[in-house]
Image (cartoon, helix red, strand yellow):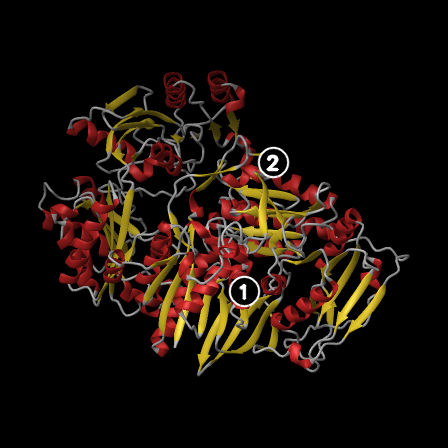
Amino acid sequence: MSQARVLVVAEDRVSTRGRVYTTEGVRRVNRVTYELLNRGRDLAGKLGAGVDVVLLGVALDDYTELIQRGADRVLVLSGPAGAVGPTPGQRARLLEQLIREEEPVVVIAAATTTGRTVMPLVAARLKTGLTADCTSLDIDPGDQALLQTRPAIGGNIMATIKTRTRPQMATVRPRSAPPAERDPARQGQVVERQYGEDLLVTPERLVEFIRDVTQEVDLEEADIVVAGGKGLGDRSGFVLVEKLAGVLGAAVGASRDAVELGWAGYPHQVGLSGKTVAPRLYLAVGISGKIQHLAGMQTARTIVAINNDPGAQIFQVADMGIVGDALELVPALIEKIAALKAAKG
Amino acid sequence: MRIIVLVKQVPATDNVKMDEKTGTMIRAGGDNVVNPTDENAVTEAVRLKKETGAEVVAVSMGPEAAQQALREAYAMGVDRCLLLSGRAFAGSDTIATARALAAAVQKAGPADLVLAGERATDGETGQTGPMVGALLGLPVVTYVQKLVLTGDSLELERIVEGGFERVVCPLPALVTVVKGINQPPIPPLHLKLRAKKLTIPVWGADDLDLPAAELGLGGSPTRVARIFSPKLSRATVWYRENGGREGLSALADWLTGEGLL
Amino acid sequence: MSSVAGVIDAALAEELRRLLGTANVTAGQGLQTIQVRPAPAAAGTGAAAIAGILKLAGHHGVGVSTAGDLPGGIELRLDQWNQVVAVDRENLCLTVQPRAVTRRVLDRLAEEGLCLPPDPCLKPGIWAGGEVIAGYAATRRVLGVEAILPDGCPVRLGGPLGADQLELGLARLILGTGGPLGVVTALYLQLGYLAPVSAILLAGFAQVEEARSALFALGGRPEMAGACFECLDFSLLVDGPTCDHLLSYAGYGGMLILELTGPNLEVVEEAYARAGSLCREAGALEVLAADNPAARQRVKKVREYFMAFVGSGNPPAYLTGPVRREWPDLARAGGLTVPYCRLEGGTLCLALAGSAQGSALPRFLAGLDRAAGRDEAVPGVLARIGQALDPGAVLTAASGILKG
């Protein structure tokens, strides 16, 4: 079937609760794969193409969910047997080999540490274009080209990019699109591919994966993020934000200033040089709202800001602006929420 | 041993303000800085230089003014600087840039270790480093927050979603580093003054045996079709009276309404 | 105005509502306190409203305070009085209302290439009151003040064209005491031109004494007049938690930070090359140069880390006054440590740790008088109030003026 193909690179993650990942660790499909499938289906529809999902060097015990969420074909490329887990280098070799064989017109992957390493390696070897961190993808009705839109200079400007070469490769920002719906009636094929050891042996070797236990709720996955900034005055002020996050079951975010003053660890930093989050609620407490911070949270669905300076720039992107002293308001909010939860029983 | 560190000059994003009326960004003031994570890469290179006596070469690609970024790298302890500049490079996307840098590393090298920052704060793609590694046929390890060199092998710790990975990689290799890896020091005055008087060699396209078709806009597979400014500001519902307390109940009601409690 | 606490009754509340409009008068439960918010409107009418309030309070024998910490009195809320009234370029004078937020005043002035000349007391950050007053209580940058005296009579002391010593003395007293002597409605502050280019030098010394003597030596040189010098006692940090910003400066007893400003890059580069060699001559082990945004940011963090550690919770007390080389030693003789001192524009600011507790302070203040000679001493007010100081008092950044 010479129908054009849109190739979605599945993102997998370690699901073991243990500290160390070993070969026995079971890998699951990361939710962002279903967001990619949603986009893949849309692009394929406009191109009259089929959607392939590829698992790079990782095997699952069941592929029906991938098919039900939109994959016409699931391509399982065998990994290096017995290795602790595929390194980005090994995944890049598998992906490059598959693309040379299948010649898809579009290849999309998640803009995660894996996607942002594998895709550039493959694009360079294939001498084709790659656009990073796209927030929206579309097909130009005129020339059927992939329209790749991404923020530049910290979200100040959006640029729509086209790629002259093929395949058109792009990484997509997690949580920038809803996951594809699950349709039990969908049918699809699972294709296993074996590749020789010579293709898979790479100089670098993964020794172990260590889960970061300090991250109870993963910042980028959380529905609610409570973030604290310099306006909280000192470490004890910041602890209030952590308590509030605890009561809400939310993740703790921090501005660059708060991290640099040592009130929170770098993994909690939201913004240009930290993480990008797009939760259902972003509650900014004592954060002035510098551009670099807005770049990391401006796509949150609802933004609430608490600050004692009515002129703080954070209020310009806030749906709800609460002007007051955070050190008074946060404890009051914690009590109010605790009471509501207790009442709910 | 030779370490080559890739350095980029980027606009200082600190002086970017938001235009209340249109809700878009305006950049006030024009001073440029060294890309923050590249400063971490230089600091790591200089640390290794002190440990192993390696020679450290800083390479940058950009307009003539990008020499300032190389002077900053020199003041931080780099031995030699090299600038790729010229009209032929103008308009390069990440692949065309990577081709030029890879050729420069080849010619200035060979390099036992190539270090670069994890991403640049202006383009933000984080692609150039890995692409240079791929074009040089080097193993690439990205998002590194800890690097230990023993003999001719690296022990690395790289940040990934949900935790971090320990990786072992032989030299030669290309490594991109994150902000948390080290704390760039403030450069000593005597190196600062010497950096001012430093003459930095500039290589054009013809110094690299690369066909012109592979460089600049012509050599770039991706092209910007359209630029627009996102509308950021939202219509804020304000709660200013008595210390903002009404806002708390409004927020609590919203949370219950959304089923988030 | 903590005169005898008269009784707040409905009549007073009613009269206040008639004067200011019901929206601006809120009576606390059981009429314990009344909050009034006179709108600034045009400077004239706003001042008349305050005069009305003070007259009524005087008639009813009830106290008025702007800090709102006076039970059984009228709390005067002036947070709407936060505008820049006028920027007079020829006389380099700024007229500003008392509750203007310092950072926004500086941003506004920067757009016109002007600034409030750097001053140890000037805290750029916003804090609760956002008061310009407290930061300017006693500096020589005050050209004058408009205030309403307790009897409701408006007064203007000094102004754009400056004032004689008596007027300025009175203005400073009203400012410094934060309200009891008069409610300030406007301030006249001296302006300076914003120096577009600046660079920072860090000089590490083995001992803090060497760093401090370098501060006085360099501070006195004419070509260094515009610079700002800070001396940090790093020996205090030896057992403190490590701060990665300090790793590359470990092993220094004292750190001197010089901030040099100038009209253009050449002038500033010439100055900091010169300052670098002077530091070397004064015994600096190493001189570092921070002249780009990233390096300047790191110096800011070194200061913040040092202040947080030295202040360890409560901010250190500051004493600010004319430059006297022997003061730091006098402070030590009085059993006080001087973790931080700053010399800028002819003003010396000493952070005194362990100052307020115990009897060390009065001896130190008395010592100041003797060392500096009666007339040049920190203004007499400090010495008089100093002797009467009780151990609990905190000395704040007010040259010569104390807040109890």
Task: Work out whether residue C2 or residue B21 is closer to the camera in this orientation and state it.
Answer: B21
Image quadrant in which you'd find residue C312? bottom left
Q: Residues within 10 Å of mark 1 (few under 14, many from 20)?
A: many
Query: Mark 1 belongs to which amino acid?
Result: Pro
Subunit under mark 2: B
Image quadrant in which you'd find residue B134? bottom right
Task: Work out whether residue C378 or residue A91 is closer to the camera in this orientation and state it.
Answer: A91
Query: Mark 2 belongs to which amino acid?
Result: Arg
Image quadrant in which you'd find residue B236? top right
Mark 2: which secondary structure? loop
Q: Quadrant of the N terminus of chain C?
A: top left
Task: Work out whether residue B62 or residue B158 is closer to the camera in this orientation and state it.
Answer: B62
Whether pointer 1 and pointer 2 mark residues with C-beta atoms closer than 8 Å, the reply is: no
Residue B130 is labelled as 1
x and y percentages locating residue B101 in the rendered image: 46, 61
Q: Quadrant of the C terminus of chain C?
A: top left
Q: CA distance from mark 1 to mark 2?
A: 38 Å
Q: Is residue C258 above or below residue C6?
A: below
Q: Earlier in the sequence, mark 1 or mark 2?
A: 1
Residue A81 is labelled as none
Taking the spot 11% from the left edge, 42% from the top edge, the residue there is: C376
A85 to the left or right of B37:
right
